Amino acid sequence: MSNNKDWKSEAERPELEGKLQYHIRCKPGDVADTVLLPGDPDRVPKMSKLWDESKEIAAYREHVTHTGKYKGMEISACSTGAGGGSTSSALEELAEVGAKKFIRVGTTSAIQEQIKPGDLIISSGAVRYDGTSENYVNLNYPAIAD
């Protein structure tokens, strides 16, 4: 292993020609600052169909990405697949190509009896025993939306 702190293994963040990201198959300029993140790739075209305009940017494995406009605002959607590992890959690569705001959309479960199937839930916090987030921040740090 090199002592050069700028050294980076190709396995750490593989990148294809032209800064094309390995997992999501997007490059700088392909995605908006704001990205919606469903887990299921089939939800991306369902969401983007509701926008004023949209186009498919990439579809590779569990990651489908569309970019377009909704009410004058540029927006993207990129599916993350299931679990923390594939979500982590998508988020890191989306940030690498210029995304700045990430909004997770999709299914959830609840333990409160007043929450019924089909209810709109906006989470303000979460328990982080997922096995991935501890690589970014200590588990004691609260997972609370700002």
Image (cartoon, helix red, strand yellow):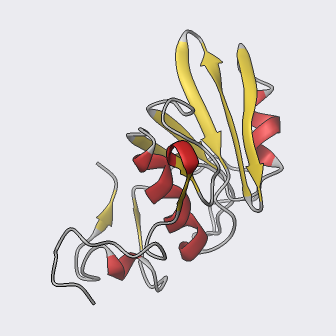
* Location of residue 87 in the rendering, given as x and y in whole percent from the top left corner: 56, 65
- For residue 23, what is the image quadrant? bottom right
The mark tally for this picture is 0
- For residue 110, what is the image quadrant? bottom right
Seen in the picture, residue 118 relative to 51 is either above or below; the reply is: below
Q: Residue at x 61, y 74 (%)?
A: 83
Seen in the picture, residue 4 relative to 27 is either above or below; the reply is: below
Q: Using residue 63 as the reference point, say whether residue 114 is left or right of it.
A: left
Seen in the picture, residue 127 relative to 100 is either above or below; the reply is: below
Is residue 71 visible from the viewing direction of this image?
yes
* Location of residue 5 in the rendering, given as x and y in whole percent from the top left corner: 16, 74
Q: Residue at x 38, y 40 (%)?
A: 100
Please tell me which residue lies in front, 116 or 24.
24
Q: Using residue 58 as the reference point, say whether residue 142 is left or right of it.
A: left
Q: Quadrant of the N terminus?
A: bottom left
Q: Residue at x 59, y 11 (%)?
A: 71
Seen in the picture, residue 76 relative to 64 is either above or below; the reply is: above
Q: Residue at x 49, y 46 (%)?
A: 19
* Location of residue 105 in the rendering, given as x and y in whole percent from the top left corner: 61, 49
Is residue 111 visible from the viewing direction of this image?
no
* Location of residue 103 in the rendering, given as x and y in whole percent from the top left corner: 50, 45
- For residue 6, what is the image quadrant? bottom left
